[in-house]
Amino acid sequence: MKVIIVLALLAYSVESRKVIEKCDGVIDVNNAEEEVLKNNIGSPYQLAIDRDKDTLFFSYTREEKGESIFELAFINLTNSEFKTVNGIVGGFANAVDEKSHTVYLGGENGIYTFDYKSNFANHVDGTNHRVWQMFFKKYLYYTTYPEEELYVLKNGQTQRVSQLNNTRAMLVAVDNFGNIFFSNSSGLYIYEEQKEKPNSITHMGDYIINSFTSDVQGNLYFSTPNSIYTIGSNKSVKQLIVLDDVYGFAIEQNGSLIYSTEDSIIRLKLNTKQC
Ligand SMILES: *[C@@H]1O[C@H](CO)[C@@H](O)[C@H](O)[C@H]1NC(C)=O
Ligand SMILES: *[C@@H]1O[C@H](CO)[C@@H](O)[C@H](O)[C@H]1NC(C)=O
Ligand SMILES: *[C@@H]1O[C@H](CO)[C@@H](O)[C@H](O)[C@H]1NC(C)=O
Ligand SMILES: *[C@@H]1O[C@H](CO)[C@@H](O)[C@H](O)[C@H]1NC(C)=O
Ligand SMILES: *[C@@H]1O[C@H](CO)[C@@H](O)[C@H](O)[C@H]1NC(C)=O
């Protein structure tokens, strides 16, 4: 099931391989140096960086006896060493709490925390949800599959995000002001906590979103199969980069963009901070 959805979401792209600059003429991606961090890897998806450990987490697909198996892996961004995570079945989602330096992983039966020393994922009590995607902002937010429901893990307890009781949410991100952005097959939406208009959900566009991420300041970005966008503090969406065959991306401490394609993970040596 997951495979079909992922492929439907991802195998969308194809236009000319890179790149137009869209950042008020500032970022020239054509001249950005590319460094392949990993190649020959199946559908790397859901990238998240632990900036404390300079490590990139992501999921990928491996074929075994004619079946697609989801696994989580990580790359040491200092020396590009690649390893897979042990102890989790159907590993698919990642998120990092930068304050407590906790790496959360999500799989077929719940949430895990990652232990670098043992390279092992330890199950967090309280949920056996099939986790699709996760985002950390003060608390751990995650969506489930196939239900597309939004949950939050608070003080060791998972609960449905009650304000979004009535909607499907496949991917989620939270900004510095507590606004919840989510996407489903109908596009991008924002939920705002407003006194005048309680539980206000606004449609922000028909984007086919395959990932959300944030930079070190907590600014939000999202990708579609052929573009990367940023969401301004005034909640406006701005196209930043046109880049073919994007499966997911993350932003390093120094502003470098790391993105994945159908079979590779690539560092673009450009500085997104210029925008
Ligand atoms: C990544 O590699 C560097 C250089 O080899 C090493 O010092 C560092 O400990 C590694 N990071 C992790 C998280 O293992
Ligand atoms: C969400 O659902 C729960 C339980 O189904 C209910 O108690 C709560 O009032 C609902 N919240 C909203 C905002 O609809
Ligand atoms: C996506 O979310 C919006 C806002 O809650 C909702 O109106 C729409 O029906 C949802 N799309 C699907 C396919 O459920
Ligand atoms: C919101 O921010 C964008 C980019 O920073 C800017 O182009 C736009 O004019 C702003 N919109 C409003 C309503 O302030
Ligand atoms: C950011 O750091 C990485 C790893 O050290 C380096 O390869 C890359 O060139 C740097 N990017 C910028 C824009 O300085």
Image: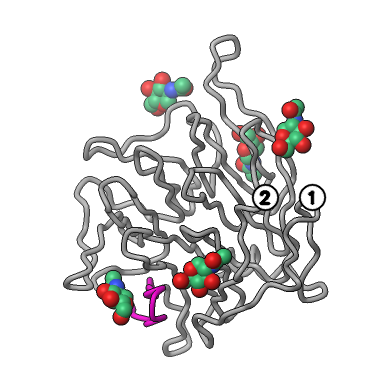
Q: Quadrant of residue 48?
A: bottom left
Where residue 154 sits: x, y (%)? 28, 36
Q: Is residue 9 left or right of residue 116?
A: right
State which image quarter holds ligand 2.
Answer: top left
Label total for image? 2
Q: Is residue 4 left or right of residue 92?
A: right
- Above or below, 87 against 177 in this view is below
- Which of 72/116 is in front? 116
- Residue, disc 1: 24
| Magenta stretch, overall SS | strand
Residue 206 magenta: no
- Residue, disc 2: 275
- Above or below, 35 against 249 in this view is below
- Residue extent of the magenta highlight: 71-84
The answer to whether marks 2 and 1 mark residues whose Cβ atoms lie closer than 8 Å is: yes
- Label 2: few (<14), some (14–19) or many (≥20) C-alpha neighbours in 10 Å: few
Q: Residue at x 38, y 73 (%)?
A: 74
Where residue 232 sits: x, y (%)? 65, 38
User: Mark 2 or mark 1, which has the lower sequence index?
Assistant: 1
- Which of 89/120 is in front? 120
Task: Label 2: state its secondary structure.
Answer: loop
The response on whether ligand 4 sits within 8 Å of label 2 is no
Q: Which mark is on residue 178?
A: none
Where residue 161 sits: x, y (%)? 42, 32
**Visible in this render: residue 257?**
no
Q: Residue at x 60, y 70 (%)?
A: 269
Where residue 272 sits: x, y (%)? 62, 56
Task: Label 1: state its secondary structure.
Answer: loop
Q: Is residue 88 left or right of residue 180?
A: left
Q: Amino acid at mark 1?
A: Asp
Q: Amino acid at mark 2?
A: Cys
